[in-house]
Every structure is written in structure tokens, then in C-alpha cells.
Image (cartoon, helix red, strand yellow):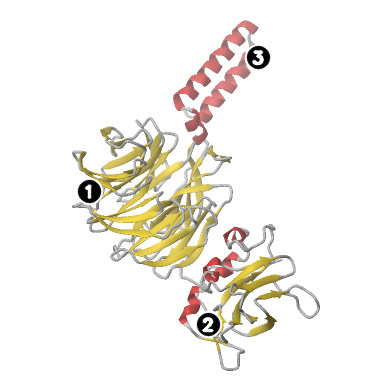
Amino acid sequence: MDFTRRLNFLYHRCKSSNEIGNGKKMRIIRASLALALAWIGMMGWADMARGWAQPCAPVQNISCSFVAHNDIIGALTFSPDGRLMATASSDQSVVLWDVATGAKLKTLLGHRGEVWSAAFSPDGKVLATGSDDRTIILWDVATGNELKVMKGHAEFVRALAFSPDGSILASSSWDHTIKLWSMPSGHLMRTLEGHTDWVVSISFSPDGKRLASSSDDYSVRVWNVMTGAQLHEMDGHTGNIWSVSFSPDGEIIASASEDRTIRIWNASTGILMHIMTGHTEQIRSIAFSKDGKLLASGARDGSVILWDPMQGKELKVLHTDPESDIWTVAFTPDGQHIASGACTKRNSNNCRQGEVRYDPIGESTPVEALKLTQFDKNGDKILEDSEFFAVVDAWVGDKIENSLFFAAVDEWVSSRQIQVAAISSLATQQNSEVALIKSDSTSISFTAQATETHSLQIEIFSLAGERLYAQKASGNRLTWRPLDDHGHLWANGVYLYALTWQRADGSMGFSGIRKLILLR
């Protein structure tokens, strides 16, 4: 009997009791309440809440969501054939879902701690899960039965990954190690040591010969799977690195950090290729599309963003909900949607509800960037130059109307909720000789760091490259009031600016073209 029918049953029992004696009426009411409590105990409070959720399945061009757990969803992954989705939660449960219908198929209970990781074997027959109880459980996907419990880590198991051929299961832990287990026996092959803090994420290369790992020690490392030797150590993040992933072709590695950046590395050399910014809080999870052309990210700011990893460009924001905290993202098997697992009812740092959401990718072709950067001989226009791609990128226009942009700009922006001006940190970091030092409701101040600067000049341009304004000041400081001839603030929008200055030795400095956002 389903929940609705049980409620109707209890309602009619109590209603009919009005027609009989008080003693018998109370006995019926007590029996009805006992039946209700017994049903709640059998089903569980979390399942009772989930009983009201409507099925949700990825449908072309449709977003939908459903409550899957009553706590954080730490992992979300799809079976190789695309028919099943597994979600793992801090509520100590793992649930298998039918992707086509959204129906819940099985709840796997066995861990005695929060479950943070889940991985299907390449043949889809086994699901591995890792928990705060320091164990790894192998489950029979068809029956939901436990196959094996593996122990060896001294602290919480944080991440799991099967090798492409299924012969190895890798696990990482808060004990600072990575362990490689032989499948299907579950025997420990070797332990990889080198990280100096929690190892949060791991990813096999497509050929299974290398393993990438990320840690709270701010490093990404690449290991030789057969020998256990460390091949590369990539440093540069300034916060804990929550997620790492090899691209499907094995050419690049992406890493996402609490420092709000995604970094793209050459997998063979360890050289940094791109730094991508856009999220306003720590980035929890990243995932490549099957063809490697797209990268999805989810963050504590409640947004899911789609990127072009090879160009280092943001393509679009698929979803934003400041009230949610996204912990995991994955592409649906058909590549048409991004699935995300989030905490959607937060009380301080506590999660009360774990929600799965599907967002359609839709058109993901990047906006064609302008190809501008240098002045022509008359000083009125900017000529074509590929370097401009690093300054005016596809996401600027989208961010103007998004209040989250204010939290994404750099430290020079004033603390007012509505800013008057902001400059992207990507641009301002290109030259350390000049800085925006103040932004308020009527003016923006710039300074050249060298005290021997003789003069400083600012020029403002439209996105089409037309020079709109120029101002020069003696010394190393310049204050610009963005007002027109009538004393009105310039129109809201995206502008470009460039600063030039003369040094004591007579040489000139040039800031390059920077993005400037004017907002009331």
C-alpha cells in the first residue's frame, strides 16, 4: 500500500469512528496511529520525504531535479551502459536509480559512516563505494548484495577509480595515501605515498598507465601505476584541490580548487596551459564530456559552468542557485545533460537535503571573441592581435547581469553590494607595475607601483575598439570620474581601458588592454 493510500485509509478509519462508541473510537485511533508509526519506521524518515518527490529523468532541453538523500550527495556516477545512476551520501546510503524513468531501484546499506565516493566497474557489474568508516565495499549491481569489504586505509576513504580494463581499483584517503587494489580479488597491490595532506580526488589515464591525484597539500601529482613512481608534481593552486580528471584522450589534466580556479595542465609535461575563473566560491567537482571537448564544473556558489578546456574559456553558466552547494557533477551518458548532486537546504554549514539536478547543455559554441589589442598610428583604434583573447573572453557579456559577478572580481572592488566598477583579476595580473587601488560610487583610482613614475595616462575604448576618452595625470596616480559632459555616470556596460606611464629613465610602460565593467 503506497503512502497516499495509507493516509486515506487512516483518514477514513478515523472518520468512521465518529459513528461508534467513544471506547471503541479510541481503540481505532490508537491502532491507526500505531499503523502509521510502524509504516514510518519501516520506510524511514528520509524515504518518507523522498516518497513525495516526482520522478525526474534527463529529457532534451528540460531541467528537472529531485530529492535523493537527506544529506550531502558526495558522489554521483553513471554505469557504462548509461542505464543506471548511483548516488552516495553523507546519510550513509548509496542509491541506484533508473536513468530513463528516474525511479529508485535499490538502496545499498552497509557503510557505517558518510559515503563520499562511488565508481562502477567498466563492465557495469560491480559498484565500489568508499566511506568515512575507512572501508571500501564492492556491491553486486544486479542484486544489491555485498561482494567484498576491503580494509587498509587508516583514515576516511575519499575517492575511488577503476582502471579502464577493470583490473585495478584505486582509492585515496585522508591518510595521505593512494592504494591500488587488484580486482576482483581485492588484494592490495601497492601504496602510493608522497602527498603531505588528504588525497581528495584521483583519475586514471585512458590507457590505465598513469594516475592523477589531487590533495589538500595544494598539489596535483601524476603516478606510474605499474611502478608506483611519481612522474610529475604540479603546483600553482592556492587552496585545497577538490577534483582532478584526465581528459578522455589523455592529453590534458584538469584540476579544480577551493581557490576558485580550474587549471589545465599538459599531462605529459606537467606544464600549466590555462587558468579558468568564473566561480565565486570553492569548486568541488569537474567532469569531462566523453569526447573531451567540454568540461563541467560545480561549486559551493550553487552554479554549474560549462568550459572549453583546450581554449581555457567559459562557454556558459548552466545553472545557478545561491541556496545550494554543489558537490559533484557528471555528464549523462548521452552527453546532453549535466547531472549535479547538491545540498539544497543548508543551515549554516549543515546540509538537510541532497538533490540531484539535470541541466541540458544545449548550444555550447563559444561566443566569437574580438581580435583587438594594439593602437594604430593615429591612436584612435586598436588593431587585431590574438593576445586580446586572454582579456576579452566569452563570459564577460553573460556576467554583467549576474549578481554573482560581484563576488568573482578581485580584491580592489569596494565592499558595496552594487559596485560601480570592476576589473577581472585575469587581466590585472598581467602587469604588476600598475593597479586599480580604489573604486567607489563616483571615481576609480589607479596607481603605478614605481614611485619614480613621471606621468600616468588612461584611455577608455568601446568593445569595437573606438577610443572614447583619454586622461593624463602627473606623478604615479590617476583618478578617473566616469561622468559624461552633463555629470551623469557613463552607461552600464563592458568597456576596455589601457594605461601608459613614463618611467624615470624615459621609457614607457603599457598595461595592455583590460576589461572594465561599469554598473550602477
- At label 1, which amino acid type do we have? Gly
- Position of residue 114 relative to residue 324, above or below, is above
Q: Disc 1 versus disc 2: distance between alpha carbons? A: 50 Å
Position of residue 136 measured from the top left corner of the image (x, y, whole percent):
30, 37
In this rendering, position of residue 501 left or right of residue 277? right
Between disc 3 and disc 2, the foreground one is: 2
- At label 2, which amino acid type do we have? Thr
Say few, some or many: other residues with alpha carbon within 10 Å of mark 2 (under 14 / 14 to 19 / 20 or more).
many
Between disc 1 and disc 3, the foreground one is: 1
Which sits earlier in the primary sequence, circle 1 or circle 2? 1
The secondary element bearing badge 3 is classed as helix
* Residue on which the image places disc 3: 18
The secondary element bearing badge 2 is classed as loop
Figure quadrant of residue 94:
top left
Q: Disc 1 versus disc 3: distance between alpha carbons? A: 65 Å
Residue 103 is tagged as none
Residue that appears at 38% across and 46% down: 197
Figure quadrant of residue 220:
bottom left
In this rendering, position of residue 130 left or right of residue 402? left
Residue that appears at 69% across and 81% down: 474
Position of residue 222 measured from the top left corner of the image (x, y, whole percent):
29, 56
Between disc 1 and disc 2, the foreground one is: 2
Q: Quadrant of the C terminus?
A: bottom right
Residue 373 is tagged as 2
Q: Disc 3 versus disc 2: distance between alpha carbons? A: 84 Å
- Position of residue 304 relative to residue 398, above or below, is above
Which sits earlier in the primary sequence, circle 3 or circle 2? 3
Residue 166 is tagged as 1
Which sits earlier in the primary sequence, circle 1 or circle 3? 3
Say few, some or many: other residues with alpha carbon within 10 Å of mark 3 (under 14 / 14 to 19 / 20 or more).
few
